[in-house]
Amino acid sequence: MSGIICMWPLLKCLLPAAGLCKTRPTDIVFIIDSSRSVRPSEFEQVKVFLAKVIEGLDVGPNATRVGVVNYASRVKNEVSLKTHRTKAGLIKAVTKIEPLSTGTMTGLAIQFAMNVAFSESEGARVRSPDISKVAIIVTDGRPQDNVKDVAQRARDAGIEIFAIGVGRVDMSTLKQMASDPLDEHVDYVESYSVIEKLTKKFQEAFCVSDLCATGDHDCEQVCISSPGSYKCACKDGFTLMDDGRSCSACSNSATDVVFLIDGSKSVRPENFELVKKWINQIIDKLDVSDNKAHVGLVQYSSSVRQEFPLGRHNNKKDLKDAVKKMAYMERGTMTGQALRYLTDNSFGVSQGARPGVTKVGVVFTDGRSQDYIGDAAKKAKQNGFKMYAVGVGNAVEDELKEIASEPTGEHYFYTADFKAMNQIAKKLQINICQDEDPCECDSLVKFQKKVEDSMSKRIALLENKIV
């Protein structure tokens, strides 16, 4: 389907789905209350909600089939599962439904749906593990009949029930009708005017996303999609790491990594927890062991505090547990002082650093430094440290670039929102290849030249003897 559907005034315009979501084969029946307590304008809003949910479904004979049962004191089968096989046809049929405007016989409606709407004669498919049966009940009052027993029979028959309550609805009866877990199957809105806010939930409830296409994955290089899931792979010449996500061409290299974390007051406690999760996301991608990656952690605000030095925790579990225990310092933002601590202390042998091993500093901050950072940032890079700079919120990008190693585009990252830090964790790759030892290379060249000279002399001697 292409273009925009504009069905009736309240619906406004429905944009076509992006095509990244497929719904698993499902028979869905909406059971909608049109009793006299539901005003005509409110019933129109229910129809808007139905139409928008339908718009997000993969409608078709072999995909999702949709039916609508309308009820008050009596029950009417407005749309059969077999009647409309396209979204346009379904939405048009929904626009024509009229309220019945009498009592509230919800139990009778559930019984009707079970016996009639979900019958094969009305287009329901034979019950199987591959076909889901779903009823979505929308009501705003207390049922005038029993719902508990009939809802249990419907659930026993394999029908998954969602219960949506509006306004002065009786919440206990919603819970009697809905499937477990109740927190996923019972919804409440204050009025019909805001029922549309549930649209996304129900679209996603029946959606099996192509997670690779939507970008909702954390594969470093290659994402291979499967229904509702994915797995990661690597390009030729790279190896998939133990975390199942990261790729490395240098998995045997040893690295000392120190995180330098801003714990100033502006970060706020709830965001500091997100920062700790972000650190652990990066740790997950490292090959942590005695002979490979070692990790240290330093926090700073108005002062600097080492949380743990390099080499203290040489497995991921212990490392991540130690990060989770880091207490929030608050106060100021002395980034320059913290960088001096990093260059003068963190990568020293007395603090667990290993001679001859690549040194990596990862600096996180959420604001402008209250002291000068230039000299310390320059010294870190002159010492050969590979420096990453990560900023959030009010962090100053010029300062981040001053901290970061060259090329800066690969070594500094910024986002306005702490909640988006996980995206930076996906992009920040600490895969260090050890540079070739020039001494070893010179020795090899000298040895090769010596062999060649020796062979040349022997060949010359042989030639002289032959002559």
Image (tube, helix red, strand yellow):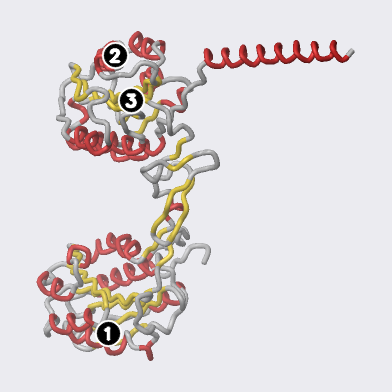
Residue farthest toward the front in the current orientation of the protein? 465
Question: Tag 1: residue type?
Answer: Ala
Q: How crowded is mark 1: few (under 14 residues within 10 Å), some or many (20 or more)?
A: many
Which quadrant would residue 34 be assigned to in this image?
A: bottom left
User: Which residue is most to the bottom?
Assistant: 121
In percent of width and height, residue 17 lies at: 45, 61
Helix, strand or loop at mark 3: strand
Taking the image as shown, residue 201 lies to the left or right of residue 251, namely left
Disc 1/disc 3 C-alpha distance (Å): 61 Å
Position of the C terminus by quadrant: top right
Seen from the viewer's position, the closer of residues 97 and 420 is 420
Is 278 placed left or right of 187 in the picture?
Answer: right
**SS for dot 1:** helix
Q: Which of marks 1 and 3 is nearer the N terminus?
A: 1
x and y percent of residue 2 in the render?
A: 53, 64
Q: Is residue 236 above or below residue 414?
A: below
Task: Name the amino acid, label 3.
Answer: Val
Q: Earlier in the sequence, mark 2 or mark 3?
A: 3
Judged from the image, the secondary structure of the residue bearing numbered disc 2 is: loop
From the image, tell me which residue sits under label 3. Answer: 257
Residue 113 badge:
1
Tag shown at residue 348:
2
**For the view shown, which residue lies furthest in the top direction?**
375
- What percent of the width, then of the height, locates residue 210? 44, 57
At horizontal 48% and vertical 63% (from top left) the residue drawn is 4
Q: Nearer the viewer, mark 2 or mark 1?
A: 2
Circles 2 and 3: CB atoms closer than 8 Å: no
Q: How crowded is mark 3: few (under 14 residues within 10 Å), some or many (20 or more)?
A: many
